[in-house]
Amino acid sequence: MTKRRFGWALLLIFIVMNGVAFQHAYKFTHFSETAAARTQDPKELSVLSKAKILFTGIDNPRPEAKSLPDIPFKTIRIISTHELECWQMEVPRARGTVIMFHGYAGEKSSLLTRAKEFRKLGYNTLLVDFMGSGGSTGDGTSIGYMEAIQVKDCFEYISEQSKHVILFGTSMGAAAILKAMDDYTLPVESIILECPFGSLYKTVCARFELMHVPAVPMAALLCFWGGVQNGYWAFSHNPSAYAKSVSCPVLLLFGEDDDRVTHEETDLIFANLHGRKQLKVYTGIGHNVFTKSNEKQWVKDVTSFLVTVN
């Protein structure tokens, strides 16, 4: 092969790789109204299915509520970057309000069981649909970046009603809280975080590793195009760095078998937090730390934390 042909071959490969990355980034951050079901966990896919996804990207249907609260609730709408639909549930003589934020491709009904535990402890709860999810407007997600503004606006809404506000977030929701604290220094009473990723680039790498596909260079290309499509520099979206701005009490929860967030990322977030902090690591638990097998321990740890700091 001549040098010229070799050069053209490299250019073609570069164009194809960027085209594939652009498609992946778009489908990863935009929900579909037509997709019938979300793509299965990579560990459950056949080799042929994995190969198809590498070129077409995942199917990501718009997240919709799977159930409703089993107690009276108010549906409210908070104006932020988008119109956010929230469920507000109150208890008599509340000690404060816990504002709750879901993870990637989730929605507020996924938080109902946790919310019930917070109400047992005497807190009102506000369950929030991020943009693109549930009853909120929009068709996509920025993986916690623009969602930080939504965290801030929800806090401002509730702070007009309650002096004691706690922020709770799982996965992407936890990352959005850390960014909101870095950007706006919200005067919250305390924060509870479940398995936030340390950096967007690392969490994208983890997605490729789950499929047993080399992360280099596609993870970097996906991050680049995802950031371009959503209007930010994705390589600087690092919750571990945002944690340095947090000085209120924090409870950080992590599953030792998490295949999306590393122990190293969690330790760095914890190390960067200022003020009173607790880290709970659950053996035999993955990215979702609120499982039936771990629910009692989760309740015990959250209860102990709130009694201690509030």
Image (cartoon, rainbow, N blue to C red):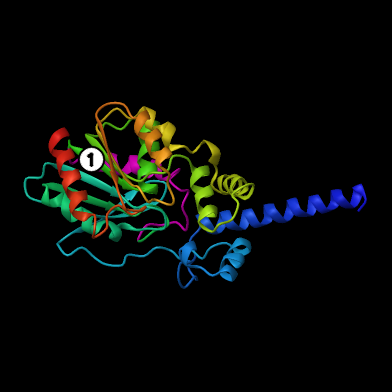
Judged left or right of residue 40, residue 111 is left
Judged left or right of residue 294, residue 9 is right
Quarter occupied by residue 233: top right
Count of marks overlaid on the render: 1
Q: Does the magenta stretch include residue 153?
A: yes
Is residue 310 visible in the rendered image? The answer is: no
Q: Which of 12 and 68 is in front in this view?
A: 12
Residue furthest to the left: 93
Q: What residue is shown at x 59% (from left), y 55% (from top)?
A: 213
Q: Is the residue marked by circle 1 packed among few (<14), some (14-19), or many (20+) residues within 10 Å? A: many
Is residue 271 visible in the rendered image? The answer is: yes
Q: Position of residue 240 (x, y in %)?
A: 42, 35
Q: Where is residue 147 in the image (x, y as percent from the top left)?
A: 41, 45
Q: Does the magenta stretch include residue 177?
A: no
Q: Nearer the viewer, residue 176 or 288?
A: 288
Does 130 appear above or below 66?
above
Magenta segment, which residues?
Answer: 135-162
Judged left or right of residue 40, residue 110 is left
Q: Where is residue 131 in the image (x, y as percent from the top left)?
A: 41, 53
Does 142 appear above or below 266?
below
Q: What residue is shown at x 38% (from left), y 46% (from top)?
A: 80
Residue furthest to the front: 283
Does 234 appear above or below 243?
below
Label 1: state its secondary structure: strand
Q: What residue is shown at x 43% (from left), y 64% (from top)?
A: 62
The residue under label 1 is 166
**The C terminus appears in which quarter of the rendering?**
top left
Q: Nearer the viewer, residue 3 or 142?
A: 3
Judged left or right of residue 294, residue 180 is right
Residue furthest to the right: 2
Kind of residue indicated by mark 1: Ile
